[in-house]
Amino acid sequence: MSAQPCRFIALNSALEVLVYQTSKDASASAAARIASLIRSKPSATLGLATGSTPIAVYQELVRMHRLEGLSFSNITSYNLDEYYPISPLNDQSYRWFMHQNLFQHIDIPANQAHVLDGTVPAHAASEHADQFDRWIEQAGGLDLQLLGIGRNGHVGFNEPFEASLIDACDLPTRLIELHPVTIADAAPAFHGSQNVPTHALTVGTRQILKARQILILAFGKNKADAVAASLQGLAESEVPASLLQTVADRVVWFLDEDSAAGLKV
Ligand code: GLP
């Protein structure tokens, strides 16, 4: 049985913000929600995320697959993003990450686990991105989107930029240029910022915000500012995770005490 949140913050009536003592408890709770969706809808369509944050969620899902018979055989998944260009054999690629942390440990068929292709030629990137959106739409949209958050408030690789709220909430899957903060954060993993790809493919806000459930996880002190800005600042394109305020009744935030530290209650 998963841990109870130590605090429930009601910032407004629609918004669920769950604060756990540890990121492990928060991850187990998020995994339990995903498992419950899969049990009630074995053919669910999942939007999956990468980064250090969801790793414990995947570990818990793998445990449930092994010990509790949780099956992913009818699940379809669409990953949020991928560096561009990058080979799937590069251990920093998100295709590699998903294989290592989830796909190789569960029974999802390879042709049902979609990750944007970091090797697509530049002239075909936009068609590839459009195709990804069409696949998600043909699947009936995402039943659940799992999200982390960047230090600059990005979700997926939807980086901060200037746009009207309407435009910012309707971005398609596309090729983007990475923000300097994102490059700096990725630099250690790539052994230097000069090795970080300058671009990435990302699912846009259009599909993310249409997901029927959105679970967003943020752990650690270095996420506290982004969390506070996303939850208590204006909904605006400069803080992409703040756009989740526009669909607050479908969003649950899973925090630990450190990432919640900037919230004014
Ligand atoms: C990357 C990913 C995001 C992720 C973010 C945070 O930029 N594109 O999807 O949420 O990093 O990563 P971490 O969880 O490692 O802090």
Image: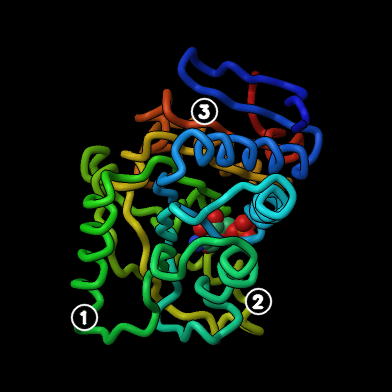
Badge count: 3
Which quarter is ligand 1 in?
A: bottom right
Considering depth in this image, is 181 or 23 the residue closer to the camera? 23
**Circle 3 or circle 1, nearest the eye:** 1
- Residue at 66%, 20% in the rendered image: 8
Residue 77 sits above or below residue 86 on the image: above
Which image quadrant is residue 131 in? bottom left
Mark before the other along the chain sequence, 1 or 2: 1
Above or below, 197 relative to 26 = below
Looking at the rendering, which quadrant does residue 175 occupy?
bottom left
Q: Say if mark 2 contacts mark 3, CB within 8 Å.
A: no
Image point (52%, 56%), residue name: 49
User: Which secondary structure lies at badge 1?
Assistant: helix
Q: Residues within 10 Å of mark 3 (few under 14, many from 20)?
A: some
The residue drawn where x is 46% and y is 38% is 214
Question: Can you tell me whether the CB of the residue at mark 1 lies under 8 Å from the nearest atom of ligand 1?
Answer: no
Circle number at residue 232? 3
Closer to viewer: mark 1 or mark 2: 1
How far, Cα to Cα, is label 1 from label 2? 28 Å
Mark 2 secondary-structure assignment? loop
Q: Which residue is mark 1?
A: 124
Most extreme residue toward the front, as rendered?
A: 69
Question: For disc 2, does the CB lie below 8 Å from ligand 1?
Answer: no
| Label 3 close to label 1 by CB (< 8 Å) | no
Mark 2, mark 3: which one is toward the viewer?
2
Query: Crowdedness of circle 1 by 10 Å Cα count: few (<14), some, many (20+)?
Result: few
